[in-house]
Amino acid sequence: MAKENSKLWGGRFSKEIDQAANDYNSSIRFDKRLYREDITGSIAHASMLGKQNIIPPENAVLIVKELKQILTDIENGKINFSEDAEDIHMNIETILTQRIGAVGKQLHTGRSRNDQVALDFKMYVKKEIQTVMQYVKELLQTIYDISADNIDTIMPGYTHLQKAQPITLAHHLMAYFQMFRRDYSRLQDCYDRMDTCPLGSGALASTTYELDRFFTAKELGFAEATENSIDGVSDRDFAVEFTFCASMIMMHLSRFCEEIILWCSNEFSFVELDDAFSTGSSIMPQKKNPDIAELTRGKTGRVYGSLMTMLTVMKGLPLAYNKDMQEDKEAVFDAADTLNMCLPVFTKMLATAKFRKEIMKEGAKKGFTNATDAADYLVKNGIPFRDAHEIIGKMVAYSIQNNISLEEIPLEKLKEFFGNIKEDFYEAISLETCVNERKVYGGPAKEAMKICLKNAKAFLEN
Ligand code: ARG
């Protein structure tokens, strides 16, 4: 009897799928990027089937050999995938069977596309996590290098984007080091948690064949095999977690970009980006724009979009596999692609940026960033902090009226605010003192920064 439906699953169908439905259902246009994971998974599966005598060992050898050839052919651009074969899994199985005939049809023994896709996707995400971790590490190294050179570079620290207290560029940048170090460990954590192999879960209820799931798990570089076959095929937590990790990294990059954009402005002028990482205007000849930083800030939105996609796709799904889950791939691919573009270009932009130390220091001199230290001076001279705050507040108001800074108030005048004030007040409120007396662990003082940098170095060298 002639076959009525040409699909690999066509046996029970009496007519061909509608063309529009076929194209709608098909995922090959985007899941073809999983070809390597799919073939690697199939090689491990076929080897295990042979080892277990589930299929004749010589057939397993033939299947493995041809799968390797298919991989080479794909990489040499010799293979065109077909929309009719729906997804990467069926495309490769179809090609295999076209090439080695009936033996190829044994590959799918004891396997479902549900455990197959879960496996491929996990392998892909594991690989992407490693790539992203490497990029994060390079960024951390760059932040460290700039910081190590700038433990004496004084700049204003801000709260509410108003000048607050003097800090150093090293102290400011090392705050980002902490964020990205957490991102790094979050990725590691995500990797470790997802490191379980779903192959052998079958469609949902595993299989009656005596599969050696621990063999395939080991072959494919997983720490363990999944413990429940329903979870094995229906779990996409790893994809949600990955897009969350990606979103967090983008959020950190975006905050950093926002500061760089501000610092590039004429109003701040704290930083000048290298020409190679800036763009001009088609109309205004003077312009030098921080497009790279702006684009990174903007791309944060699309990565958050991937996270929302993943959370929303999964939220109403009954166990186990549902076709909705085919929507997981583009979200994850886009998040990974975006990160893999943003991170290295951002790192290069940062590494080549020139910080304008004199302007930063001038910035710290203005805005009364030493007012807290002035109050602390009074406290050390026996005034309760609240009263000291009040007295220095009055000094600030006086300085604003006279358009001077606190250290420019003559001693005679200072005494009108606080009788016991002495010459050493000026030293106590110098920017250097303000910074270097904050030697509390985690503070901006050179002493404290050296410890922070030492820890960072140990992390980077590990
Ligand atoms: N293309 C599918 C996906 O990405 C593969 C799994 C299909 N399984 C199924 N039973 N239809 O999710």
Image: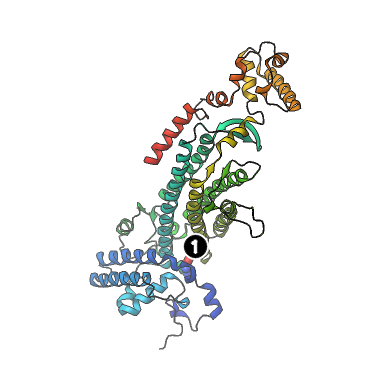
Q: Position of residue 117 (x, y in %)?
A: 43, 64
Q: Quadrant of residue 383?
A: top right
On screen, 285 above or below 375? Answer: below
Q: Is residue 293 left or right of residue 213?
A: right
Q: Position of residue 48 (x, y in %)?
A: 29, 64
* Residue sitting nearer the eye, 110 or 460: 460
Residues 263 and 133: in front is 263
Percent x, y for residue 328?
51, 61
Secondary element type, mark 1: helix
All told, the count of numbered labels is: 1
Given the current orientation, which residue lies at the most extreme bottom position? 1
Q: Residue at x 40, y 41 (%)?
A: 460
Residue sitting at the far top:
420
Above or below, comparing residue 140 to residue 316 in the picture: above
In front: 63, or 447? 447
Residue identified by numbered label 1 = 329
**Amino acid residing under circle 1:** Lys
Answer with left or right where residue 367 lies relative to residue 331. Answer: right
Q: Is residue 226 visible?
A: no
Question: x, y (%) of residue 444?
Answer: 53, 30
Neighbours of disc 1 within 10 Å: few (<14), some (14-19), many (20+):
many
**Residue 146 is at least partly visible in this image:** yes
Queried on whether the Cβ of the residue with tag 1 lies below 8 angstroms from ligand 1, the answer reads yes
